[in-house]
Amino acid sequence: MIEEVEAGWEVSKSEVIGDTHLVTVTMTSVDPNQYTEEIHNKLHENLTSHSHRFSVSTNLFTFDHEPTDEDIEEAVTNNGFSPNLTPSKPSSIKTTTVGESDVLEYSANFHPAEFLELLNMVPISLDENPTSMSLKGDWLHLYYVNEGHTPPSQFFSNSFFLYSVRIHRTTGQIKRKGYNKGLTLSSDVTDTLAGFDSIENIVAEGIYLDEPLVAIYYMKSSDEEDYVESFAVVDTPYYGTTWEDGNIIRTREYKRNE
Amino acid sequence: MAYGLTVNNDSGQVIIDSDISHFHFAGKYNSASSVAGGTLQNHTGNTDNDGGNFPYANLTSLGSTVGHIYKYNITQADVSTKPPMCFIKPTSTGSSAPFAGIIRMYFESGYWKVELLQSTQTSSGPVLYVFTTLDQLTLGSDSYGLRVMDSSSAVTFDSQNRPLRIKGSGSVTTPSLAHTGSLGSSWLGTLDVNCTPSSMSHSASSIAIDKQIYYVPSVAHCALQYTHSASDSGIHDWNRYAWARSDIYWAFYRSSFRILSTSSLQCSYAIYYRGHLARTAADSGFVLGLSALLGNIDADVGSAGMVPYTNSSRNVGESQGVIITNSDWYA
């Protein structure tokens, strides 16, 4: 259920003491995203990140004259009030790689037009639509995030936290990768990865099922502002490095497209 | 009049009148005990970590610095009808000195109990210079000086008992509020005293600043309240989440004073009582109203009996008399 809360401010108490006008104001802020019931249900079905946040504050403001609505509006605004909370609708995820064009990943729910355009390029029949997509060169990337981390059975039989499938837009060739949170690779594997010892704050790993590749995703630094809460949500930018036969072949940066 | 004595100064003001029970020095008093001002703080309820955005910030903060209360036991024969007059010798003076004011007097267990509120705690509290009428004191035995009696032969003035000598006086008006402007934002109330102190000039500048003592009761007070509530639910990182949080901050202030310079005294506030309650739930259906914080009474600490009212003040805006004298005269 989506709670209906009206945003704005109202005077809940006013008094004059001497030359001072005391005005207590109640301020209500809401998430500006408006979902239809259909979209909202879809968000929940797909476990797509979204929120229904709102807040209410009461605060005292003083004036040396009887305040007008404009005076109060200015005072509450100066105190940081906005009827809209920070929009929770995420922008697309941008992947940046040196020497390559930036790539945007579009959500089926939040960027339906772009998503549909990519989905229509898929040359094979899909049992299950992905939750987001991107296009890198001739490869369509399909990302699956399912409740309970259930694998998309058309492509995977093993369980991962997230799943991606690359499909060549003309040949239909398929390559698969599963993602795990943290690092589960054994030292037998990581010892073969050039420069692995210099990598800290690992947030996830990528297991390629059809290629001799390994990817590791890690925070940009140990600074607090670089802490990655969720590598899948990409709330904080981070890096991902890919090795082929133990040699680094690329490092990408993942972030939201601001 | 047919009997008695009246002494006036050059301005015609009465200095001694045999029909008036003059105040005389009854002693210096250090505090017998002290205690921090009242604080009520707690957080109860669950949180929802799955959301990743539960607002943990300042769940146990207080948002203000409470004052310190010094307690004095004044010895006096009559502990029911004649409260003593207490001058304050502050712990320090100047623009960094704490503000202090006597907020309560009552008689109990053979003492006049005096409570003094100071805006910050100091290692030793202010010293009280206490004055009372002569019927509460032992009269001197010297065979010289001036002693004046009323028509009932009650002594009303005796130079041996060091009568109160007023060196300077004035009037001061308490600021309208202890904190002007916004009281906070998001999950943090900022209810520390933040107002421009009012000032008063007086004519006792010939007394060294560290020798000045003042008499002015704390009669003004104010109470401020800030609240913030939020609720959220949805999907985050492929997990369903829901949480709600409601916070209420408040502070109750009493007027208090300090000596700013040899010729001026300031009035501001000290926090007598403060609080912060936070209630949380892993459920966005949690009532956002603050009634849950306060026993379903009202979304207002005033209505819940925490303070007498909220976001207002009392006994401000009126000139209040201040008396200054010299502590060296009563060493």
Image (cartoon, grey):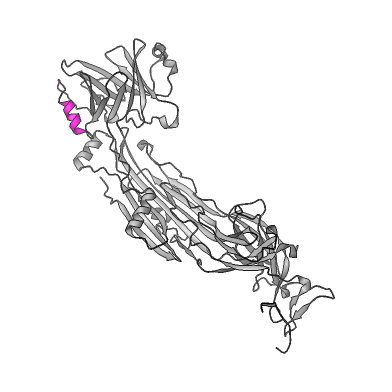
Towards the viewer: A61 or B84 = A61
Which image quadrant for residue B155? bottom right
Q: Residue furthest right?
A: B143
Residue A127 against residue B67 in the figure, above or below: above
- Residue B1 location in percent, x, y? 70, 88
Locate residue A200, reporting x and y percent.
43, 22
Residue B108 visible? The answer is: no
In the rendered image, the quadrant that contains the N terminus of chain A is: top left
Q: Which residues are magenta?
A: A111-124
Horizontally, residue B99 falls left or right of residue B224, namely right
Residue A105 drawn at (x, y percent): 25, 27
Q: Quadrant of residue B87?
A: bottom right
Residue B78 falls in image quadrant: bottom right
Label count reads 0
Of all residues shown, which one is farthest toward the front? B10
Q: With respect to residue B298, does A132 lie above or below?
A: above
Q: Is residue B214 visible?
A: yes
Q: Is residue B108 magenta?
A: no
Q: Nearer the viewer, residue A5 or B258?
A: B258
Q: Is residue A81 above or below residue B203?
A: above
The residue at 24%/33% (across/down) is A46
Judged from this view, the residue extending furthest toward the bottom is: B2
Query: The C terminus of chain A lies in which quarter of the figure?
Result: top left
**Pick the front one: A91 or A197:** A91
Percent of width and height locating residue A37: 20, 42
**Side of B10 where B139 appears, left or right:** right
